[in-house]
Image (spheres, rainbow, N blue to C red):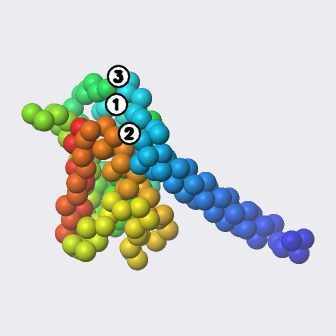
């Protein structure tokens, strides 16, 4: 509108841009989830260093953890060679870390850890956030499931992460306590 001040126009444009990005991400994630469920997308495994990928994904949130005053702890081995679909796995790590930072209050802690076990590799993402009750925990991997606490989420992130992990013949599970936080374990 012509009668808006420059600052108001910028604010409106930013709001439209934000909504457009959210809608684009929603559509993209819906399509990926649908293709994974129908098995029209199959992982394209490649050899790469999982620890390097985890670090790269975590660094995307550096501004957020510093701005929020969240302590970020990392416990990764020097190197962990894997053969997975790097692009799909990046979606998993980004989603788990994004949720951990979103639900951790200032002064809280987010932890990213990786270890080799007898069964394979385990990646753990923990937070000291609000936690989830048992009812919520029963539904977190369902598409479009959100809680009142999530704010602006689409309810697709964990469903997509679960499907990606299953297509890699792995599994994901969560533990949570109200007021103490949540831990996700990814077994590959």
Q: Please, is residue 184 above or below residue 88 in the view?
A: below
Dot placed on the residue nearer the N-terminal end, 1 or 2:
1
- Residue at point 67%, 65% (across, down): 15
Q: Which residue occupies the foreground of this view, 124 or 46? A: 46
- Disc 1 from disc 3: Cα separation: 7 Å
Q: Position of residue 72 (x, y in %)?
A: 30, 51
From the image, which quarter does the N terminus lie in?
A: bottom right
Where disc 2 sits, the SS reads helix
Q: Position of residue 177 (x, y in %)?
A: 19, 69
Q: Please, is residue 151 above or below residue 126 in the view?
A: below
**Mark 2 highlights which residue?**
89
**Mark 1 highlights which residue?**
84
From the image, which quarter does the C terminus lie in?
A: top left
Q: Crowding near pointer 1: few (<14 within 10 Å), some, many (20+)?
A: some
Q: Position of residue 2 (x, y in %)?
A: 90, 71
- Residue 107 visible in the picture: no
Determine whether label 1 and label 2 are within 8 Å by CB: yes
In the image, which disc is placed on residue 47?
Answer: 3
- Residue at point 46%, 38% (across, down): 41
């Amino acid at each position: 509108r012509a009668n808006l001040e420059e600052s108001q126009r910028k604010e409106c444009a930013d709001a439209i841009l934000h909504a457009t990005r959210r809608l684009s991400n929603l559509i993209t994630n819906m399509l990926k989830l649908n293709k994974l469920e129908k098995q029209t997308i199959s992982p394209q495994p490649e050899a790469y260093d999982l620890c390097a990928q985890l670090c790269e994904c975590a660094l995307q949130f550096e501004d957020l953890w510093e701005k929020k005053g969240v302590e970020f702890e990392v416990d990764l081995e020097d190197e962990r060679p894997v053969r997975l679909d790097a692009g799909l796995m990046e979606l998993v790590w980004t989603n788990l870390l994004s949720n951990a930072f979103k639900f951790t209050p200032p002064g809280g802690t987010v932890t990213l850890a990786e270890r080799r076990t007898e069964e394979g590799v385990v990646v753990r993402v923990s937070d000291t956030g609000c936690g989830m009750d048992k009812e919520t925990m029963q539904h977190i991997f369902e598409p479009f499931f959100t809680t009142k606490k999530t704010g602006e989420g689409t309810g697709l992130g964990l469903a997509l992460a679960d499907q990606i992990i299953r297509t890699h013949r792995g599994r994901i599970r969560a533990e949570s306590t109200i007021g103490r936080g949540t831990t996700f374990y990814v077994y590959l």
